[in-house]
Amino acid sequence: MIGYFILLHRFPEQFKRMFNAIYAPGNSYVIHVDKGSGPEFAADIAAFLKPFQGVAIIESKKALWGGYSLVDAELRGMKQLLKMNRSWTHYINLSGQDFPLKSQAYIRAFLRANPRRQYIRALDQRAARPDTMNRVSHMFVEALGRMFRTRLPRAFLKDATPYIGTQWKAVTRSFCHFAVHHPSAERFKTFYRRSFIPDEAFFQTLMMNSRAQGEVMNDDLRTIDWVPDGDIKLRPRTFVTADALRLTLSPDLFARKFDAEEDAVIFDLLEAHLKTPAANIYAAETTVKPQDRTLEPA
């Protein structure tokens, strides 16, 4: 079984289509609705989710891009999932603008076949992304709805290596328990609470500097088309109908991102795809991706 955590802040109707596509009895689902989305939005989502079993909505807080609030929401989501159900073995996080490329039967079979693998993109930050070291080399604070870098330089955590990737992951229950409850995780939480864009680095760094977490795969199981976007450098391109063939042939489990206001037909095509044998029958030999590789902890 799977424990899902979903960050949601807009596009309620699109979220409902996505949720219907990933819902399966036996799974557990925790939703965080951004407090900035407003009470009417939150009430709409709560009313929609009420008939579903195994679903919880955690306390809404304002999620600030670039801030620790995103990591905090995810840790709270993990904690709630751990409390509400003991049967799920793997954790997957999503946003409201994601969509599955495989059925829940396929995803469950895939995870059963890879029980100890951690699917998360992780690169040695100093070696692969030295341009991002300024995210951790100074202390940052959240104020007035923005992130500010202070003039206070700081060294990285002693006897640890910084890692970086994306915020998306499919990891084991044991890692979630470690991240939420283990005392050795606390120094990482304290450090990254004052960093910039920690949701792309905290979990990677915690995992890669911790032993006995299974095989760490440099893969988040998502099809994402990264394109340049000014100061952010890269952003996920919005998929449209013209991308349907690529998405239906992808070995990945999910894709992002989508915008129903820009193209709603793509959802019809993917919903139809989820009923096909290709999206329902897992065969290990057909799902190996050339970039997959096991990473060694620091």
Image (cartoon, helix red, strand yellow):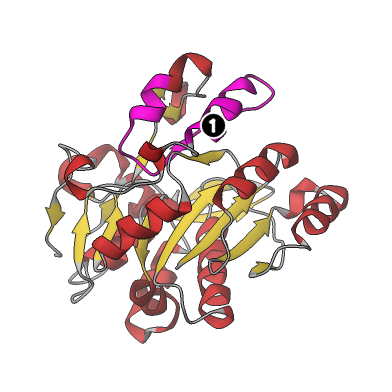
User: Which quarter shows the N terminus?
Assistant: bottom left
Q: Residue at x 21, y 54 (%)?
A: 217
Residue 169 x, y percent position in the rendering: 38, 54
Foreground residue among 111 and 171 = 111
User: Which quarter shows the C terminus?
Assistant: bottom left
The residue carrying mark 1 is 272
Query: From this viewpoint, which residue is outermost toward the right?
Result: 40
Quadrant for residue 88, please give it: bottom left
Segment colored magenta = 245-273
Query: Is residue 216 among the parts visible in the rendering?
Result: yes
Foreground residue among 130 and 220 = 220
Q: Residue at x 64, y 48 (%)?
A: 20
Disc 1 residue type (three-letter) = Ala
Q: Residue at x 24, y 47 (%)?
A: 283
Quadrant for residue 175, please give it: bottom left
Quadrant for residue 290, please give it: top left
Q: Residue at x 40, y 28 (%)?
A: 247
